[in-house]
Image: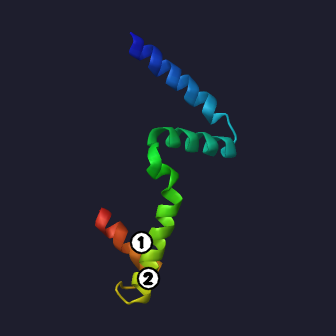
């Protein structure tokens, strides 16, 4: 019955977490996510995203991508999800 005890502990922790402020819940979420990721790639995640943004911007400036209004992209996404 160890599983039931863990489940009740998790439930209790969840209840306590929901009593935290929005800011503290966000910090807790970040800590939990970071504990799942780990490794060198996590440490470089921001740098990797910056590199990706630059790469995408360069492709856009070179005319290698098409531009669409955000509302059209969102509408297409909604249609594809149906």
Tell me which residue sits at (46%, 39%) in the image. Answer: 36
Quadrant containing the C terminus is: bottom left
Q: Tell me whether circle 2 and circle 1 mark residues in contact (CB < 8 Å).
A: no
User: Where 4 sits versus 81, above or below?
Assistant: above
Q: What is the CA distance from the residue labelled 2 to the residue labelled 1?
A: 23 Å
- What residue is at 45 percent from the left and 21 percent from the top? 7
Q: Where residue 58 sits: x, y (%)?
A: 44, 82
Which circle marks residue 28 in the picture? none
Quarter of the N terminus within the rendering: top left
Image: 15 above or below 63: above
Q: How is the image coloured?
A: rainbow
Residue 59 location, x and y as percent? 39, 82
Tag shown at residue 58 = 2
Q: How many marks?
A: 2
> In which quarter of the view is residue 20 placed?
top right
- Specify the farthest residue to the front: 40
- 64 or 7: nearer the viewer: 64
Which residue position is annotated with label 1?
Answer: 74
Q: Residues within 10 Å of mark 1 (few under 14, many from 20)?
A: few
- Residue at point 36%, 84% (across, down): 65
In this orientation, which residue lies closer to the viewer: 80 or 58? 58
- At x 52% / y 25%, what residue is drawn? 11
> Residue 74 in the image: x percent, y percent?
41, 72
Could you tell me if residue 68 is visible in this image? no
Q: Is residue 38 left or right of residue 15?
A: left
Percent coordinates x, y for residue 17 in the rendering? 61, 33
SS state under label 1: helix
- Is 6 placed above or below 70 here? above
Provide the secondary structure element on which disc 2 rests: helix
Q: Disc 2 or disc 1, which is closer to the eye?
A: 2
Label located before the other in sequence (2 or 1): 2
């Amino acid at each position: 019955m160890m599983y039931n005890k863990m489940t009740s502990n998790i439930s209790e922790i969840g209840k306590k977490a929901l009593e935290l402020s929005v800011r503290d819940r966000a910090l807790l979420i970040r800590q939990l996510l970071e504990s799942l990721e780990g490794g060198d790639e996590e440490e470089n995640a921001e740098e990797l995203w910056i590199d990706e943004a630059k790469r995408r911007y360069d492709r856009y400036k070179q005319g290698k991508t098409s531009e669409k209004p955000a509302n059209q992209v969102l509408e297409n996404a909604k249609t594809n999800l149906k």
